Image (cartoon, rainbow, N blue to C red):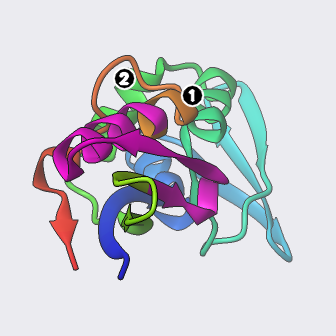
Amino acid sequence: MPCFTVLPMAKAARVLAALKRDGWIETRRSGSHRVLVKGDQQRIWAYHDGVDLGGPAMARIARDYGCTLAELRKLLDELVMSALRVELFFDEEADNWHYRVPALHINGGGTPTREDAEQECLSAVAFALEANSTPRGMSGVTNL
């Protein structure tokens, strides 16, 4: 039977709220497209509020809005993140542990212990999200 682990991931609405706290002002809106202005800069925000934003999208947003990924993540520090489902399961035939992260299309494993599979999975997620170390909030991983 698979075990499930929940990892944090920012929703687009939370990232937009962080940008607004950083001084970006929404001047127009048409559907899911919003025009944001800060000083003489203007950007189009085209993410639906409920979309989960992983590392590549976060890095692109940080670049487009003139900050580093670390600075953008710092703006999100106090915001609630959404969950990323991780499935850990034991293959009795192969006698080892495997993992799956459906939202990021990650499959892997073949480790002798569950702890090894968890660590390998965390590394794979960090790599997929373009993190230099363990992604934010993953120290408190919740097992279901």
Q: Can residue 74 be seen from the camera position used here?
A: yes
Return the x and y of residue 122 as percentages of the image width and height: 34, 40
Q: Which mark is residue 70?
A: 2
Q: Quadrant of the N terminus?
A: bottom left
- The residue lying at 45 percent from left, 44 percent from top is 109
* Quadrant of residue 88 within the rendered picture: bottom left
Q: In the figure, 128 relative to 85: above or below?
A: above
Q: Can residue 17 be seen from the camera position used here?
A: no
Return the x and y of residue 117 as percentages of the image width and height: 31, 45
- The residue lying at 85 percent from left, 77 percent from top is 31
Magenta stretch bounds: 99-124
Of 93 and 67, the residue lying toward us: 93
Dot 1 lies on which element?
Answer: helix
Q: Residues within 10 Å of mark 1 (few under 14, many from 20)?
A: some
Q: Which mark is residue 102?
A: none
Q: Is residue 135 left or right of residue 144?
A: right
Mark positioned earlier in the residue sequence (2 or 1): 1
Q: Is residue 34 left or right of residue 134?
A: right
Tag 2 near tag 1, CB within 8 Å: no
Q: Residues within 10 Å of mark 2 (few under 14, many from 20)?
A: few
Q: Quadrant of the C terminus?
A: bottom left
Q: Which mark is residue 62?
A: 1
Residue type indicated by callout 2: Ala
Residue furthest right as drawn = 30
Q: Is residue 122 magenta?
A: yes
CA–CA distance between discs 2 and 1?
9 Å
Residue type indicated by callout 1: Ala
Of 19 and 93, the residue lying toward us: 93
Return the x and y of residue 22 as percentages of the image width and height: 41, 39
Q: Is residue 2 magenta?
A: no
